[in-house]
Amino acid sequence: MFLLTSLVACLILALVLPFLGRRVLERRIVFVDLALAQFAATGYAIGLASDTSGPLWAGSITVLAVFAFAALPYASKLPKEAVMGAMYAVAAAAGMVILTQLPHAEGHMTELMFGSLLGASWVDLMILAGLGCLAVITLKFAGDDNYLQRVIFYLALALAVVPAIHAVGIVLVFGMLLLPALSAWRGERNGSIWLALIVSLSGAVLGVLAAEYLDLPPSSSVVLALFVCGLPMFIWNIKKYI
């Protein structure tokens, strides 16, 4: 299969990101993963512009964002989604400004949005799997609403998001975090993790197969497949709980 490494990358994310996505929905902080992903992408842009290590810049900037976001309690009366959405917009604008100073700016922008899924190496996949497992383990220590616990939770997100941005791009990271978890959502609480994993794994396989045989962009194809796989379950939940 031509897209073998793409399939393996998507399967790794399909096994990791639904665990994080469920916690994001539970805390009503959906924009945090998108904001952290965009801060990571801006770090990669700085690395490209300065001809230095993109992952190092991405990790450093994302850690700073983690400590800043953790200052806002989950129970805060301040609209958390608005704050995080605003930070996403600022980070996205900064990233675009940096990239426009580079030759082939449009290609760099596309790569950050949709990743380099076709070019993922086996080393990239090992890093993705290792940090993903560490992120899921870290979740066990992020249960309460205090500063340290919030830092731990956001760090768990960052561990999974930063390498995933390089491999698959912002769009697929956001889709894989939220679509499976949302499809399994039950009323006002999380549904079964197994249902979310079924959606994520099915979407990953079908999306990559569609990209392979229909000559579609892999990241976009997987996101659409996740939507199609999760939609029947989502509609059933709406009918049952609203």
Image (cartoon, grey):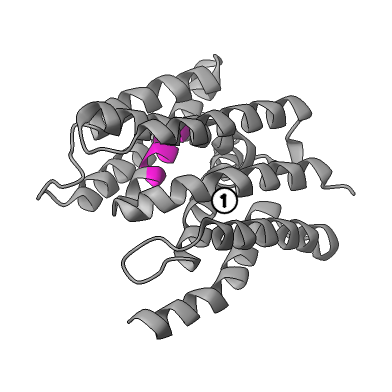
Q: Which residue is mark 1?
A: 172
Q: Position of residue 53 (x, y in %)?
A: 55, 16
Tell me: residue 157, above or below residue 124.
below
Q: Which residue occupies 61% across, 65% down? A: 224
Can residue 96 be seen? no
Q: Is residue 35 magenta?
A: yes
Q: Which residue occupies 80% across, 60% down? A: 209
Can residue 183 be seen? yes
Q: How many marks?
A: 1
**Res 129 quadrant in image:** top right
Of residues 158 and 191, the one nearer the viewer is 191
Of residues 165 and 107, the one nearer the viewer is 165
Q: Which residue occupies 16% across, 47% down? A: 75
**Res 211 quadrant in image:** bottom right
Q: Seen in the image, is 157 located left or right of residue 152?
A: right
**Res 43 quadrant in image:** top left
Of residues 114 and 21, the one nearer the viewer is 21
Q: Seen in the image, is 118 located left or right of residue 28?
A: right
State the SS at label 1: helix
Q: Seen in the image, is 226 located left or right of residue 124?
A: left
Q: Is residue 59 magenta?
A: no
Instruction: Pick the quarter of the image with the C terminus.
Output: bottom left
The residues colored magenta run 33-41
Q: Amino acid at mark 1?
A: Leu
Q: Position of residue 190 (x, y in %)?
A: 40, 60
Q: Position of residue 66 (x, y in %)?
A: 32, 29
- Identity of the residue furthest to the top in this view: 52
Tell me: residue 68, above or below residue 144.
above
Tell me: residue 242, above or below residue 144.
below
Q: Main secondary structure of the magenta part?
A: helix
